[in-house]
Amino acid sequence: MGMGNGDCSNLFNLETGVMNQTTPQPATSLPSYITSAVPNSPEKRAPWYKNTAPTYAGIFLWFVFWDPVTNGGQALSAGLGVALLGLLLSALACHYLFYLVPGLFGMRTGLPLYIIGTSTFGAQGGFIMPGFLMGVLQFGWLGVNAFFSSMLLYNTFAGTSLSPESTYPVPGHAVLVVVWAVLAAFMGLKGIRYVAQVATYLPLLPLVILLILFVKTVGGVGRFDPQSLVAAGKVAHPLSSGAVLALMLTYVVGFFATAGAAGVDFGVNNRDKKDVQMGGLIGIGLAILVTAGLSLMIVAGAYGQAGGTPPAGVTATELMGSIVGQDTAKIFWLLLALAAFPPACFSSFIAANSFKTTLPKVNPFVSVGVGTVVSIVLAMFGWAGKVVPVFVIIGASFGPICGAMVADYLLNGGRWTGPRSGFNPAGWLAWALGFVVGILPNFNVGVPAAPVLAFVVGFGVYAAAAKMGLQTPVVPLTGALAEATK
């Protein structure tokens, strides 16, 4: 893996806090995917409440985010207040650490993530990171989507109560997984415009369902005792308050990590800093607190109302039968599954676009087809249902990317430098070390709030490497792209 042409002679200016750019490379050394990029013009942008906020809110309205937030009841084992505090801290981390700088990068330049990333990872390196990696991880999301949506559909029509803890594969569930994933992949490739036409309204279904369940259970919230989860055998080992906070950070930030880096792509549609800030505060921060907060309170309320006869589950979907009746619960499950189909299609669409850019000679049906097979295997055998390990992987992958981007932004006074030649060592060192730290929980190494720690490592390593001059030279740009660096 080469480092590109030229020496690594960029030094850190201690007086200005800005990298001194030396040994410029000729523009002809840039790949065509960079030189052909066109910044989004100001007249095509809109207020935050028309793009960034509703789009991000739709991500958190997805039941795959808010339903497993109890983490098998452990998130509530130190009390509802601690869990809600963990949500608040997670919302702040998502907005200020993972989203804000990428969003500002996009707003200032009008350029997408796979172009902005070239200043952190290099013109050749950015091709892979975050471009190709973003596409690859979409199939993880497709697997998660297929697993949970098929689980709800199976429970609706089979009259059973499959849960993420059940033993997989289950024949009927496996068939649904295959149909769901294949159909989502095909629609992502060929019919995304039809999916987009209904995607604006379907996310409202989960919100309505959450509100109905909350109204039905709110009377029991004040009577919730976390010991009832222990007495019911739902939580064998209650967590301390600190452990719950770390768990919530791992869960929420891990879920959000890829969407945080994609803040660049959201930011290109924002007019100014206020749009970026408000879009994140409402679409990310408030949406996390509303959706996951309602889910936690629904479970707490159901246990508070139940008294000495604890309910059967520890998630909102598992408790629907006891809250609204089995027939209504089946309708809710079906509606939640239908509302989850557009996100599955969009995952395939994003992956296809990523592969078209990074693997232009490979037929998208082949690359997406291979990825879909992987998604099916992950969902069929239940691995995609183990959300905390999955979110740890995602957080480990994109936590250091976001951390390195934030360091890059601050070191250069909030300005995008433009692409660096080859593979920028600072970015790759930051990612590698951050990933190693972030993935440790999946090897039974106790690292609290691993996605956040991966971000911190990525930030620190990039800043230190840049100060040591471990950056490849910036390649000068011309025309509209040059304007984006000002």
Image (cartoon, rainbow, N blue to C red):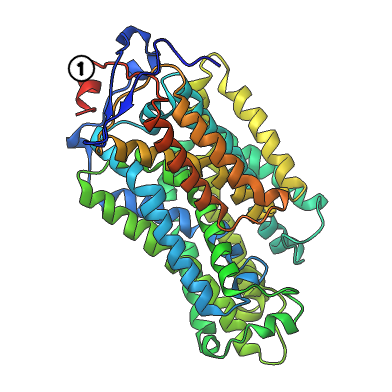
Q: Position of residue 186 (x, y in %)?
A: 58, 34
User: In the image shown, does 462 or 144 lie closer to the viewer?
Assistant: 462
Residue 406, quarter of picture: top left
In front here: 44 or 307? Answer: 307
Kind of residue at badge 1: Gly
- In this picture, is 52 found above or below 192? below
Residue at 43 percent of width and 32 percent of height: 465
Residue 407 spot, x, y in % from top left:
37, 40
From the viewer's perspective, tell me whether residue 43 is left or right of residue 130: left
Provide residue 79's location: percent of width, then percent of height.
57, 80
Q: Is residue 139 left or right of residue 40?
A: right
Residue 212 visible, this orientation? yes
Q: Is residue 319 left or right of residue 66?
A: right
- SS category of the residue bearing label 1: helix
Residue tagged by mark 1?
479
Indicate the position of residue 226 as horizontal and vertical percent values.
63, 82
Give the residue at x 60% y 29%. 368
